Amino acid sequence: MPSLLELIYAPRSRWNADARTAFSDALQERYLRVMNLTDKRNEEKRFQLRLNADASDGAVPYAALIAPDQDLSGGYGGMSVVAFPSDSDDGGPAIIGMVVGTNGLAPDEAILGRPGHARKCAAIAAALNRRHSGCAWAKHDPVRIDMELPKAVASQLESWQGPVKKYGRVLYATFVPPSARTVESDALVLDALWSFIDLFFDERGIAPKKPFQPSAARLRTAWLSCILPSIAPTQVKRLLDDRRFVIVEGPPGTGKTEMAESLLRDSFGGRGRVIQFHPGTTYETFIGGLSPQDGGTLGFTFRPSPGHLMEAAREAAAKPGEPYLLVIDEINRADLAKVLGEAIYLFEPGRESREVTLQHHYADTGRTLRLPPNLYVLGTMNSADRSIAILDLAVRRRFSFVQLWPQLSVVKQHAGDTLAQAFEDLLMLFVEHATDDALSLVPGHAYFLGQDDEAVSRLSTGVRPLLEEYLSQGYVSGFAEEIRAFLSRHVQEA
């Protein structure tokens, strides 16, 4: 009898009852209480294995894990994991995918409509594509069963036109195994299979057997890293070298300011300065303008004074062989388009010869402003601060943006068990329920760095006020009860 991996590469003509055995044996080994998938007395009633072994011309054979209490012939509904062999014996391996049954979303409307399900499918595809480019795809919204497959995806599935024509609208994630088998490709195929199958079971509250939990955790960590990727300072430094003007954005407590200061210290040798924007920051304080000076008949007079950018440009130009970094903390707290004024023209990588004419004459620079090629600008931006204006497109295209996300690995390394568990629960709560906008609000790991004797203080004085502010502002209205339940459980237990 073929193994599950061998079945994926088996010719279409061999997709017969052996497919049931291959899936049954693999599932029985990995999952608890799956003793006999064909036995109606099976105590595990949260899924079914369905097989269409008809390999005749025009038929679309498949093997599928489907929702419970669905018919085993004709159409079915809900979330499913499906493997489709190619249209012919020499057409290549079977493709693996997530499919909405042709009878519609029921009984899995809640699963399919939850932001986290689509997010996880996309992350699984991204994790697989990291290892073999272009092998996987996921639809942004699985419930849109009215949409055809994108042309770019359909063009990759020419050897599976039967499944595409019949099920293309309900197919919301796919993996195409490499045609040539190697040790690496076999490992990739197995990881793709179990990533989708584990997701199917996890959505139904079924955990793998204990010996297979490390494998499931490894796969989960791989795709979770695509939702919340880790960015090292060296990666930001490379981006600065390439683009010169970079903004690091992310939720509160992810270490944005700390990263900027470490780059200034370690990569620029301390050559530069740190400033902070706020709602009172103006063109005059950042670029330059008139400011009161001592003297005059009334005790003061107005004279042109350089702003932070002019001073940074002057200091960088004084030592052209040494890189200079201007760090702008909380760069989105001010109206950046107004603060930059005409100087926005200078923020163009590779155009160091550009200059602008200023309204006033300054002692050191005259009436022109240029940004020397050794001047770099790094901004930090809190994505949870909804009280400020969104950066306009003209500003955004002149900066490269890097997203800094909370990191579970940091908390596991530097926090006690109580805080680590609270952070993981909150992190997965946002991954599961938050919209794309709300995901950027997930509290960062800095809120949870401490030992168990600090748990009460950190959760009650740090995490609780932040989450209560989210609730009061309506930022997490889609899963407010989940947030309240988290607060009730973890703060009281701590």
Image (cartoon, grey):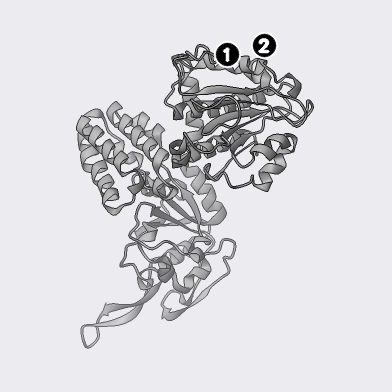
Q: Closer to the camera, 95 or 191?
A: 95
Question: Cα distance, mark 1 to mark 2?
Answer: 10 Å
Q: Is residue 78 left or right of residue 473?
A: right
Mark sitting earlier along the chain (1/2): 2
Can I make out residue 48 in this image? yes
Can I make out residue 476 in this image?
no
Question: What's under tag 2, amino acid-wise?
Answer: Met
- In the picture, measured across the screen, residue 491 lies left or right of residue 361, that is left
Tag shown at residue 25: 1
Residue drawn at x 25%, y 38% is 487
Q: Position of residue 407 (x, y in %)?
A: 41, 37
Residue at horizontal 39%, vertical 52%? 383
User: Dot 2 corresponds to which residue?
Assistant: 1
Residue at x-position 37% and y-position 49%: 257
Q: Quadrant of residue 431?
A: top left
Q: Quadrant of residue 255?
A: top left
Whether residue 377 sits left or right of residue 87 in the image: it is left
Q: How far from the left and from the top, in percent, is residue 142?
A: 53, 41
